[in-house]
Amino acid sequence: MTTATMPQEITPVARDLGFAGIIRSEWIKLRSVRSTWWSLAILLALTVGLGAQVSSSLSFQGVAGVPTQDAVQDLAVYAVMVSTDFGALIVGVLGVIVIAGEYGTGMIRSTLTAVPMRVPVLFAKALVLAAAIFVVSAVAFAVTVPISVGLLAGNGVAVRLDDPQYWLALLGGTGYLVLVGLIAFSIGAVLRNTAGGIAVALALLLAAPVALGLVLGLTPSTWLETVSTLLPSLAGTVLYSYPTTQSWVNLSTVTADDGWLTEPWQGALVLIVWVVVLFTAAAVLLRRRDA
Amino acid sequence: MIQARSLTKRYGAKTAVDGVDFTVRPGVVTGFLGPNGAGKSTTMRMIMNLDRPSGGSVTVNGKPYAQHRAPVRQVGALLDAKAVHPGRTARNHLLAIAATHRIPPSRVDEVIELTGLESVARTRVGGFSLGMSQRLGLAVALLGDPATLILDEPVNGLDPDGVVWVRLLARQLAAEGRTVFLSSHLMSEMAQTADHVLILGRGRIVADAPMSEIVAGAGSASVQVRTPHIARLVPLLEADGATVSGAEPDLVSVTGLAAPRIAEIAAGAGVVVHELTPVTRSLEEAYMALTRDDVEYRAERIAVEANR
């Protein structure tokens, strides 16, 4: 910092603030901190590793009954996506960190100084996060599929890859991870605190279904059952389930459509409602609160 | 040009900024002074749309900051040098902010060079000293080549070289016709940098005037007179309207008369004068006098503790 002179600018160096620029800015931010790469690497490794491990040990040997192709496909989907619950925890943590980390470090004040309209920042951040989760989880599943199919074939399970439902279920898993990331992101934006955000996100994704399941086991109640079906994790299992009447887990029993949430699109809809409600709350609070 | 109209900020029952009106003009450096807790930072945060005013309004170049099409071209601000993600490198931090306004990477490298950050541009900000963080904050503020600069304690933590650089930069930017609004607790530094002074005390404007007026207005300038004939000279000076206070047996402080007039009176009476020194008031004295009643957090406790 010597006694340098300011360069004399003739054309303005800064152009108008635009959404494309804000997206680019958020992408630079996402890729320039290590926590992003750590979480995405863990997501990738966990999906491929667990998928391969489970695929190598799954077969219909010793199971009573004859599996239909549906049951085979159901098992194949399970084998690839066995890690999705863990994956949801990882993208949940990432989603919270991406926004709450800005509050924790004070970065948010630099961000909102550059984009004083504020709300476009939230949209751009969510978009970049969703894209990153989508790409990494899609790649993770794409890598896992050939490994899983090969290992399953070795166990006498012949998976048909020309089955669109198989791929739709995997796409559902990818969509579930993206939507969970956005739910956690919105929670982080509302709470503005990394530790609190992660605690609430994990409580919603992990603890709530377990707790509700315990309560329901003791005192059955249709009202609580409805609530538990609408939790993100349960809506997620509907979203990425393979449509079959014969589950690979027990070939002799026919799976009953007992819940009122059965179609994958319904699961997706429930998750989207979660995202929209929480994201709207985050946007309204961002506009109102002091940064 | 920054214009505040009845600008107010309340936090619960506490009023941090209490209906202030002021205009910060382009072409001059305006210093923003006030005791801790007077509301300076809150005022600056409201200008930048980081805090919502509880009442009133503030505009920059005619519009609220958030309504400008290219905000960073209008205002460059350094409010908090630590408002940075510690895991990101300095250059990536600048690139991310530059991207919002499609500022080219070449400009990023330009401000890195300008602020002397070349050697640490690719290191993570977490390990930066306060001085380094300040330089990065200044680099961010200059990124958009803004028409207005708002700097909160910009020399805090800087080395002497950096302090001089900030002073010259502020003066040059003002000379180019830009608006420069900066706060500091270093009175001697402010006295050399600012042309105009805005003093805030307990959320209200205490003074808003050119530096020369502030310094002059703190109390009339005095003249130190040293003479072995105090007893003969003092009545003559008092007869001419001066106020005299003695400090030492042969030294008095005279207010109300200029040095040449004192010399004339002494010469007329045949009094030998050994020393005749006009004493100008410093900005620090002026500031202390103006904010005496507005200091929020007094240091009186320290005296009590020390006497034990």
Image (cartoon, helix red, strand yellow):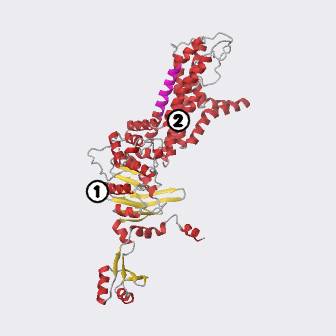
Taking depth in this image into account, of A13 and A54 the one nearest to the observer is: A54
* Residue B175 badge: 1
Q: Chain letter for mark 1, please.
A: B
Residue A134 is inside the magenta segment = yes
Same chain shared by disc 1 and disc 2 = no
Q: Would you say B20 lies left or right of A175 here? A: left
Q: Would you say A191 lies left or right of B224 here? A: right
Residue B209: % across, % down: 36, 65
Task: Mark 1: give few (<14), some (14-19) or many (20+) Cα within 10 Å.
Answer: some
The quarter of the picture where the C terminus of chain B appears is: bottom right
Residue A127: % across, % down: 46, 33
Residue type at mark 1 is Ala
Q: Is residue B40 above or below residue B129?
A: below
Residue A190: % across, % down: 53, 42
- Residue at the disc numbered 2: A94
Which residue occupies 29% across, 55% down?
B177
Which residue occupies 50% across, 45% down?
A105
Q: Is residue A99 above or below residue A155?
A: below
Residue type at mark 2 is Leu
Q: Is residue B35 above or below residue A218?
A: below
Secondary structure mostly seen in magenta is helix
State how far apart marks 1 and 2 are (Cα).
47 Å
Residue B82 is inside the magenta segment = no
Q: Are marks 1 and 2 in contact (CB under 8 Å)?
A: no
Residue A277, can we see it?
no
Taking depth in this image into account, of A252 and B257 the one nearest to the observer is: B257
Q: Would you say A117 lies left or right of A279 here? A: left
Where does the magenta region start and end? A129-144
Q: Would you say B113 lies left or right of A197 here? A: left
Task: Mark 2: give few (<14), some (14-19) or many (20+) Cα within 10 Å.
Answer: many
